[in-house]
Image: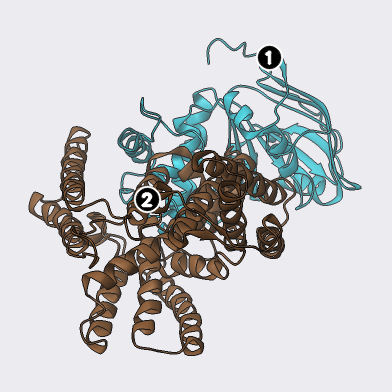
Chain colours: A brown, B cyan
Amino acid sequence: MSNQTPGWWRRAGVDLRLLLMSVLLVAMGIVFNVMSGGVFLSPENLYNVAQQTAVVGIVATVMVLVIVARHIDLSVGSVMGFVGVLIAYLQYTSGWSWPTACLAGLAVALLVSIYQGWLTAMLGVPSFVVTLGGLMSFRGAAFLVADGKTQPVNDEFFQRLGGGYDGGIGTTATWILAAFVAVVLFARMLQKRRARAHHEMPNEPLWLELLLTAVPVAVVFVFAAVMNNYQIASKDAPQGLPIPVLIWAVVAIVLSFIVHRTRFGRYVFAMGGNPDAAALVGIPVKRVTLMLFALLAVLVTVAAIVSIARLNAGTNSLGTGMELYVIAAAVIGGTALAGGSGSIFGSVLGALIMQSLDSGMLLLDVPIGKRMVIIGQVLIVAVVFDVLYRKRFGEN
Amino acid sequence: MSTIDASSPLVELREIRKAFGGVKAVDGVSVNLHPGEVVAVLGHNGAGKSTLMKMLAGAYPIDSGDTLIAGEKVHIRTPAEAQALGIETIYQTLALADNLDSVSNLFLGREKMTRWNTLDDHFMEVQARKVFHRLNKNFTNIRIPVRRLSGGQRQVVAISRALYFNARILIMDEPCAALGPEETAMVGGLVKQLKSDGVGIFLITHDMPDVFSLSDRVAVMKNGKLVGTYRTEDVTEDEVLGMIIAGKRPEGKEQAHR
């Protein structure tokens, strides 16, 4: 059995498993870089990997919560396709402005999610079945919206939401943002120490916490520097942070906040840990489940917007197979399929690992068939690792 | 507790009925509980005692019958409503979220929020330390998931939920199952302490020594019906077992309703 007094890394809030995932990600980057002759870690490739990952990453953050609550949503790819085509259709064929089209898309996504969530929460139909049906139905709906025709989106501002040619926020804004993140991280660390001291709880040594805060800050600055180093040949300034990555980061921060600081987040975890206990202590399980599905709808819409903006079009095949990537990202990031444990930051790492693997192999000209075989097996390796890890440490 | 007239029951359940499908789980049961009293609710598995208690705790809706709390008729539809009336339950399964830590479990469903409507973790941790310390001085690892705690520590967390929120009616469902002798003694001591504070306790148990050392009255159920309610001191262990197993009321003993 595990020891009762946690090690310093745990007391200081370091998750061993996430640390391992980070190491794995870095190792993958180095290996691919060597094998590709220095292309993989070039600013251009990293810029592309980062923004390609954003769509999967955005949905994966909320998929973590869905899985934690002992549900699953297999229909995210299809719903994203459906909503994406709808938003593009409303802009291109119906001539709506992009904000109204997006709001209409959001409304439809909420309807879809509440319908599926209602079947799950109120009638107790397993979400696996509901969303497996949805996987098929909403792919069909995506076809029906525009009769299978591709819907281009032309609004220049809208296109920037997907990254691409004008989709970076520029170098100055990137540096300011990085500095802002650094200040916030250090301020939070100090504020937490003060609060603990105020409540007469023990603090870790200052140097240790400074070091532990300095690591993510360094990562942020390195990332900012890399993004500021990528310049499209026909442009006269570097790109800076791609907007999809910015959106993803905001989504991840908001969801982390929800998980750690709100009742809703705590209830989602309680429901996953012990559904009976959650009901017995008076948690409104059905309402929380519905809210969770509504949150999923919001983020699927965001992902749909980023996705069609990136492709400059909505097609009925948008998001095909995405559910696998999203669930894999969550699982690789340490979300237990049995429910009850998972982290938003883990899903970020998981999404990056999935995407790095995919584009790394693409760079090395691994054929599509082999890529699919490998990625499928990587998901299984992640689950096996999860099972073994939990057996070894008996916890999350 | 001094405001409650000692002569009026804290809890009065009248003709409570509950059916699951065609099965009458609880069939016209009336039982009451006074402040500072421990009533042991006994019966076989499936006798309906847990169902009866879950209705009082708001976990199951009541099909028919009246619930009176301190003389006032109430309709308890959810666990939250039961908690608002001062009814706390310690379930056999402990009803803890295994993946959350002790502090989160203590406040689960009743989190203390800051003025920005976020979780006030520091406040909750400080309060939790105090209440856990009252029950077990060695219990300090309160920030690890409760699945890694011992049975006794988990029981401390479950009982703390009742203590911290000042239960006036406590339902204990097999509180000593899966506990060692020391921890059983701790629960016994706690029951006596709560009793002297005027808390009314329904104690569901299979353990005869617990029944005779802790309870003031026994209420025995069989097949969803109440066999009878007697003062514990008036009956012998054999008579109690006779009621549980055969549903046979002891001859010449008078039932007691307080």
The quarter in which the N terminus of chain A is drawn is bottom left
For disc 2, the marked residue is A247
Q: Does label 2 lie on the same chain as label 1?
A: no
- Residue reaching furthest right? B22
Front in this rendered view, residue A260 or A256: A256
The disc label shown at residue B8, or none = 1
Residue under the image location 15 percent in, 47 percent down: A179
The quarter in which the C terminus of chain A is drawn is bottom left
Front in this rendered view, residue A211 or B165: A211
User: What secondary structure is marked by label 1?
Assistant: loop
- Residue reaching furthest left? A207
Residue under the image location 37 percent in, 61 percent down: A348
**With A54 as the anchor, is A166 left or right in this view?**
left
Question: Percent from the top left, x then y, of residue A274?
Answer: 56, 53
Question: Percent from the top left, x then y, of residue A270?
Answer: 51, 48
Q: Label 2: chain? A: A
Residue under the image location 46 percent in, 62 percent down: A311
The answer to whether residue B221 shows anywhere in this view is yes
The answer to whether residue A340 shows anywhere in this view is no
Front in this rendered view, residue B145 or A317: A317
Indicate whether A187 appears above or below B84. below
Indicate whether B14 appears above or below A45. above
The disc label shown at residue A214, or none = none
Residue under the image location 33 percent in, 48 percent down: B139
Question: Percent from the top left, x then y, of residue A327?
Answer: 51, 66
**With B183 as the anchor, is A338 left or right in this view?**
right
